[in-house]
């Protein structure tokens, strides 16, 4: 069966010629590989590449055939294919006869669906139940209508189901490793001398000491009530890992943040456009509300633009928005970014139940009744195990229950839904804003503490920490306008000051590879 939709490609190219901004405005983000297939001419691929490059060069209005011709004339082999196929005449023809920009989404969707099918076939999958034909006209109409009503996600889920069923049928279980205590012990001991066991830097020097940095294979479960900045805190931490510098308004200079790490932020409630201003505020030090209101000085505009440029140059901060999700989807997304983009730091905004999660759990338990706390516990444990399996650092959040307001000790017992959610995580904290009782403790501690000039406005109750001896209450100051944080001091559960030595973890920059040419 033909899996190369020529008519849709012609129409899509005509739409893009008339309105090139569709490249970034459409929900379906086509790329040049959607216009190329084994055994087919590169003609459409070359035209799309030219349009995309002209758009990136600043052409936002209609792109003319002459502009495409001029652009391609600088590339010998692509231009040869373009002229052999009467490219200029072809473009004039499709512009005049095809491609109302309003129809672009329909054509782009169909093109992407066929790209998925070509990829599936190349990997050895069949087309049954997705794209079939019949010699019987009536039956063929039914089959084609079925395909037309399938979304891109429907097709992907079809093949995911095949893979998951295969894995469930034949997978024996988790791999195990055994050994004798002391075996290779001296080698391990000497490795601590050569390179102490620390990860990259956190957002605070006390946190670096408490958690030994952001260790790979570790996992963090952060819990808090609504409006306690769980998601914005994790977004600030993710940004801190991904950037190489931020702006200091006190010195009027950019300051190094070390190496840019590859980070994935999975959001289930807010789209990327809603998250971007928080990220810019963190890098620039300009309050987020003033960025959104565009109530800015000339200098602030310059710094924000440089902050956005910093993000683009790092190209290491990935954001996935998935409003409807289940554990299998989360796992697949993380595996994709770990294997294809070498991501080592993953943030999943927060664990909660939805219809898809409950349906997947029901499927795995063959319809047996499963309590909410059990579902949440299984879901959370799966996330923590992903961190171990892929040797990444994973951070996620949960809500706390109503008992948190009255509880003197905040630990896993105040987690909403299931206290066993924290079992598999290596770090567990509950975030709270200081109460009037906390303020009395803060005043007493700060009266005898030198060098701390800011009053804490956030407390982390660290109830689980497998990486060091430190557990208790970490007091922080968070600038809620920019989400920059500063850890100030730590006490034990008896509100006695603990001695925690601030630790700075430095990482050197690495050279970047040169970008490839457009063809």
Image (tube, grey):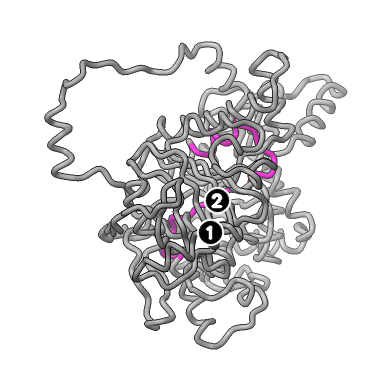
Along the viewing direction, whichever of 196 and 496 lies nearer the viewer: 496
Would residue 127 be counted in the magenta stretch?
no
Q: Is residue 106 visible?
A: yes
Q: CA distance from mark 1 to mark 2?
A: 7 Å
User: Which residue bears the numbered disc 2?
Assistant: 431
- Identity of the residue furthest to the right in this view: 138
Query: In the picture, residue 295 is in which quadrant?
Result: bottom right
- In the drawing, what numbered circle is on residue 159? none
Q: Is residue 290 above or below residue 516?
A: below
Q: Is residue 75 visible?
A: no
Magenta stretch in the rendered image: 311-334
Q: Which residue appears at 59% of the width and 67% of the height?
A: 277
Is label 1 in contact with label 2 (beta carbons under 8 Å)? yes
Quadrant of the image for the C terminus?
Answer: bottom left
In the rendered structure, the answer to whether residue 36 lies left or right of residue 496 reads right
x, y percent for residue 409: 54, 42
Q: Earlier in the sequence, mark 1 or mark 2?
A: 2
Would residue 329 be counted in the magenta stretch?
yes
x, y percent for residue 353: 69, 35
In the rendered structure, the answer to whether residue 105 lies left or right of residue 260 reads right
Quadrant of the image for the N terminus?
Answer: top right
Q: Which residue appears at 50% of the width and 44% of the height?
A: 429
x, y percent for residue 160: 60, 27
Along the viewing direction, whichever of 319 and 81 lies nearer the viewer: 319
Q: Secondary structure at mark 1?
A: strand
Along the viewing direction, whichever of 247 and 95 lies nearer the viewer: 247
Q: Which residue appears at 14% of the width and 44% of the height?
A: 194
User: Which residue bears the numbered disc 1?
Assistant: 458
Q: Secondary structure at mark 2?
A: strand
């Amino acid at each position: 069966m033909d899996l190369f939709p020529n008519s849709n490609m012609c129409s899509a190219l005509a739409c893009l010629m008339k309105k090139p901004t569709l490249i970034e405005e459409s929900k379906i983000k086509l790329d040049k590989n959607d216009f190329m297939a084994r055994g087919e001419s590169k003609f459409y691929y070359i035209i799309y590449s030219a349009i995309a490059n002209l758009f990136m060069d600043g052409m936002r209005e209609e792109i003319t055939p002459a502009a495409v011709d001029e652009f391609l004339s600088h590339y010998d082999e692509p231009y040869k294919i373009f002229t052999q196929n009467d490219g200029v005449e072809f473009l004039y023809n499709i512009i005049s006869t095809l491609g109302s920009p309003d129809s672009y989404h329909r054509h782009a969707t169909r093109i992407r669906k066929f790209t998925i099918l070509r990829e599936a076939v190349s990997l050895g999958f069949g087309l049954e139940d997705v794209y079939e034909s019949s010699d019987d006209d009536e039956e063929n109409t039914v089959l084609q209508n079925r395909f037309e009503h399938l979304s891109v996600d429907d097709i992907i889920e079809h093949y995911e189901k095949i893979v998951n069923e295969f894995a469930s049928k034949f997978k024996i279980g988790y791999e195990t490793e055994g050994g004798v205590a002391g075996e290779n012990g001296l080698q391990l001991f000497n490795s601590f001398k050569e390179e102490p066991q620390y990860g990259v830097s956190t957002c605070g020097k006390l946190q670096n000491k408490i958690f030994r940095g952001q260790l790979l294979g570790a996992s963090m479960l952060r819990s808090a009530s609504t409006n306690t900045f769980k998601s914005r805190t994790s977004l600030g931490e993710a940004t801190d890992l991904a950037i190489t510098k931020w702006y200091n308004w006190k010195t009027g200079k950019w300051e190094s943040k070390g190496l840019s790490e590859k980070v994935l932020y999975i959001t289930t409630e807010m789209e990327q456009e809603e998250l971007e201003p928080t990220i810019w505020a963190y890098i620039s030090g300009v309050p987020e509300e003033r960025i959104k209101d565009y109530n800015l000085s000339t200098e602030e505009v310059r710094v924000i633009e440089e902050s956005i440029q910093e993000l683009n140059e790092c190209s290491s901060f990935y954001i996935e928005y998935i409003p409807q999700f289940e554990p299998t989807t989360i796992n697949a997304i993380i595996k994709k970014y770990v294997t294809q983009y070498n991501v080592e730091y993953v943030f999943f905004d927060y664990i909660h139940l939805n219809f898809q999660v409950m349906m997947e759990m029901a499927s795995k338990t063959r319809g047996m009744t499963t309590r909410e706390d059990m579902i949440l516990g299984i879901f959370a444990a799966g996330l923590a195990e992903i961190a171990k399996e892929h040797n990444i650092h994973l951070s996620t959040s949960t809500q706390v229950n109503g008992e948190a307001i009255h509880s003197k000790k905040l630990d896993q017992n105040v987690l909403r839904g299931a206290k066993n959610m924290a079992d598999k995580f290596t770090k567990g904290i509950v975030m709270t804003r200081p109460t009037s009782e906390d303020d009395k403790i803060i005043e007493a501690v700060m009266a005898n503490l030198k060098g701390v000039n800011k009053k804490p406005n956030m407390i982390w109750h660290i109830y689980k920490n497998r990486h060091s001896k430190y557990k208790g209450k970490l007091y922080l100051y968070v600038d809620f306008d920019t989400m920059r944080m500063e850890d100030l001091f730590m006490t034990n559960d008896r509100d006695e000051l603990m001695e925690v030595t601030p630790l700075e973890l430095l990482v050197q920059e690495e050279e970047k590879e040169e970008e490839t040419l457009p063809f």
